[in-house]
Image: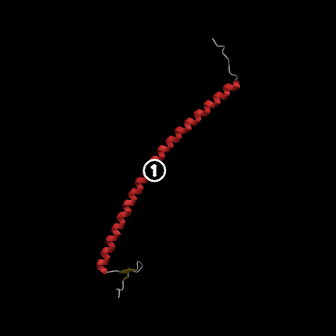
Amino acid sequence: MAEEKKFNSEELGKIKDLQTKYQTITAKMGQLEVDRVLLDQAMERLEDNKNKLTEEYVNVQAEEKQFVSDLNAKYGAGNVNLETGVFTPAQAAK
């Protein structure tokens, strides 16, 4: 049988130090992955909100387009002063 040899305290300390470093790094890698999952979830929520706002924006554009069309049908082409409410018809092309 081979003769047993004993590591000195410095060597044992170094081995334990390396193990601790590996454990710390492994824990940090795990936490990083958890953070990544949480970030992905937050990104999904942001994307959902963006899509809802984009849809609302498109709806407001359609509402504006219809309103302008209705005003043009009622008053004709022209400009309105939003402060006074006065409508000035556009001059006909000559």
Q: Locate residue 37, reporting x and y percent.
A: 47, 43
| Screen quadrant of the N terminus | top right
Q: Is residue 34 left or right of residue 91?
A: right
Q: Locate residue 58, reporting x and y percent.
A: 36, 63
Q: Residue at x 31, y 70 (%)?
A: 66
Q: Residue at x 41, y 55 (%)?
A: 49
Q: Secondary structure at mark 1?
A: helix
Tally the marks: 1
Q: How is the image coloured?
A: secondary structure
Q: Which three-letter amino acid code belongs to the residue tagged 1?
A: Met
Looking at this view, name the residue that lies furthest to the top. 1
Q: Is residue 8 left or right of residue 24?
A: right
> Quick one: label 1, few (<14), some, or many (20+) residues within 10 Å?
few
Looking at this view, name the residue that lies furthest to the bottom. 94
Q: Nearer the viewer, residue 93 or 35?
A: 93
Q: In the rendered image, which residue does mark 1 sit on?
A: 43
Q: Locate residue 42, reporting x and y percent.
A: 46, 49
Q: Quadrant of residue 52?
A: bottom left
Q: Nearer the viewer, residue 7 or 65?
A: 7
Above or below residue 93? Residue 29 is above
| Screen quadrant of the C terminus | bottom left
Above or below residue 66? Residue 10 is above
Q: Residue at x 31, y 80 (%)?
A: 75
Above or below residue 61? Residue 4 is above
Q: Quadrant of residue 27?
A: top right
Q: Residue at x 53, y 41 (%)?
A: 32
